[in-house]
Image: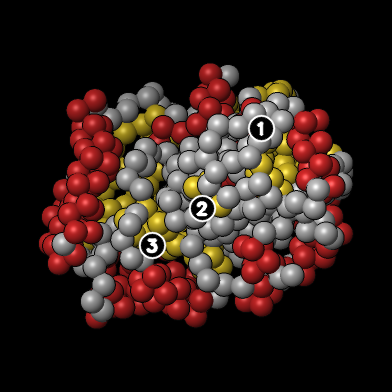
Amino acid sequence: MGTATARNGSTATAWRNWAGNVTATPTRVVTPASVGELQEAVRRAAEDGLRVKAVGTGHSFTAAAATDGVLLRPQALAGIRSIDRAAGTVTVAAGTALKDLNRALAAEGLSLTNMGDIMEQTVSGATSTGTHGTGRDSASIAAQIRSLELVTADGELLVCSEKENLEVFAAARVGIGALGIVTAITFAVEPLFFLTAREEPMGFDRVTAEFEEHFAENEHFEFYWFPHTGNCNTKRNNRSQGPAAPPGPVSGWIEDELLSNGLFQAVNTLGRAVPATIPSIARVASRALSARTYTDIPYKVFTSPRRVRFVEMEYALPREAVVEALRELRAMVDRSRLRISFPVEVRTAPADDIALSTASGRDTAYIAVHMYRGTPYQAYFTAAEHIFTAHGGRPHWGKVHTRDAEYFSRIYPRFGEFTALRDRLDPNRVFGNDYLRRVLGA
């Protein structure tokens, strides 16, 4: 990654994202220690004719945060600012990692209602790209935002909520970094609760036939299909009275470290070197996981360590279309010469009211496809994307896709609302980059 940088900015070498598929060489890097310093960095960048982007932990697979101008690292802007127990909210600085927020909230007897399965991202990076988990009634992390602070292109600080700058709030919760730089977020939280997770292997034909039933009966339902097999692993998370009964140290290590990280790393390395072995490996791997049930606080159930690096594409489909699309994906893989070593993930989300949320205005299900880092992924992702777009799919803003502004203008009813707001807040494209030019237009 790049060289170390001074707080007031210095020349930097290349920045690289987590997956290693995106690099950028900014003119300078700034690590502001206060909101005031961040505002000044934006003003100075505009005066120098440079574009400016904030970058979190680099967990996006797109170039959403890449810049040849000023790269802002907000990690020094971290920590909980305040907790309002009466209102059920927490205000947190934008550079706070989700893992740190989750642990700090748990220590206060509080929790987010829902979250994704990785918690390495900063809160601003995760929400700005629409990061989500799975839920029948509870939506993405961004949908849990009650207000946010945004530094605009002229260096001003806007406070946005349902009561203040509502038009900006309606869009900036999933802003892809196009409207400004988020400096703080106020989330809705609730008293800490327990979830009981039930993980169970299940056949592809059964889980797809019973998908709507599983969705209706569980607060959080997801499953993984192992390509080249008819095998899936399901996970159902539901609230319980407790007490905590986490996986035992041995079984937890086998499932979460050996099978999901250590052994998985080894078999993916073998599969990359000898692709012909992948179908056999997949059949063995898909049978290695066993049924288990455990109970714990939310972040310990929702999230898992992910140390095997990969590249990912994920599309949001109308929920009623997901089973058909998944069956088409399986048929495509079966008749192709592709060799896929990563499982395909299926999750859900209820409709929300955020302009460019992938669940905006419609009940949604997600299909995510992955390839091991360093393995050619274009043929698989291109074929999958053809299926997903045929069903009106919306790609995750932080994951690989080839769609452009013309496509988004057709599948997002409020796309014009967002781009008009961008024109007002950032007419000179201080926060622009090549990715935003493609997905939002010039």
If the image is split into quadrants, where does the C terminus sit? bottom right
Q: Which residue is mark 3?
A: 369
Residue drawn at 26 percent across, 36 percent down: 257
Task: Tell which tag, 2 or 3, sits nearer the viewer.
Answer: 2
Q: Amino acid at mark 2?
A: Thr
Specify the label residue 247 is tagged with: none
Residue type (three-letter) at the residue carrying disc 1: Thr
Residue 99 seen in the current view: yes
Q: Can residue 410 be seen here?
A: no
Give the percent coordinates (x, y) of residue 397: 57, 59
Which residue is more in the foreground, 107 or 201?
A: 107
- Please identify the quarter of the rendering in which residue 144 is found: top right
Dot 3, how many residues are within 10 Å of its Cα: few (below 14), some (14-19), or many (20+)? many
Q: Nearer the viewer, residue 402 or 287?
A: 402
Q: Which residue was labeled with disc 1? A: 31
Residues at marks 1 and 3 touching, judged by CB atoms closer than 8 Å: no
